[in-house]
Image: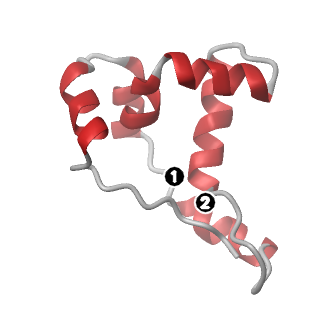
Amino acid sequence: MVGKRQLSPASGTLSLLGKVVPTTNFYRQLKQSLDLTFLYELVAPCSGKCGHQSIDPVLFFKLMLVAHLENLSSDRALIRHYQLRPSRLGVY
């Protein structure tokens, strides 16, 4: 089953990050110009009908994109990167 991330933009931390991160931020501009919703339809045939939900394909693609742009070579480095810069998670 294809999982979908359920985030409400009005939740406490995310709304604060939206106010703190400038509108000229690269990742904020990338989010506004990049629509990845087509990924749900693309991965649906590859997903099973029962069992655990998968990670949200859009979130996974965004994580991999940030890893590439920030030149992060491992999953642990990527998670550490997000822990140090939570604005990336909220904005993008």
Q: Viewed as shown, does residue 59 lie left or right of 15?
A: right
Residue 15 to residue 44: above or below:
above
Q: Viewed as shown, does residue 17 lie left or right of 50?
A: left
Q: Viewed as shown, does residue 13 lie left or right of 47?
A: left
Residue at point 24% right, 42% down?
A: 12
Residue at point 76% right, 77% down?
A: 45
Q: CB of mark 2 within 8 Å of CB of mark 1? A: yes
The answer to whether residue 67 of the structure is visible from this angle is no
Assign a secondary structure to mark 1.
loop
Query: Seen from this angle, which residue lies furthest front?
Result: 12
Query: Seen from this angle, which residue lies furthest left?
Result: 19
Q: Position of residue 33 (x, y in %)?
A: 37, 38
Q: Quadrant of residue 34?
A: top left
Residue 41 to residue 78: above or below:
below
Residue 92 to residue 21: above or below:
below
> What residue is pinned by disc 2?
39
User: Looking at numbered disc 2 in the image, what kind of residue is underneath it?
Assistant: Leu
Q: Position of residue 75 (x, y in %)?
A: 77, 29
Q: Quadrant of the C terminus?
A: top left
The answer to whether residue 81 of the structure is visible from this angle is yes
> What residue is pinned by disc 1?
36
Tell me, what colour scheme is on the image? secondary structure
Q: Label 1: few (<14), some or many (≥20) within 10 Å?
A: few
User: Looking at numbered disc 1 in the image, what kind of residue is underneath it?
Assistant: Leu
Q: Label 2: few (<14), some or many (≥20) within 10 Å?
A: few
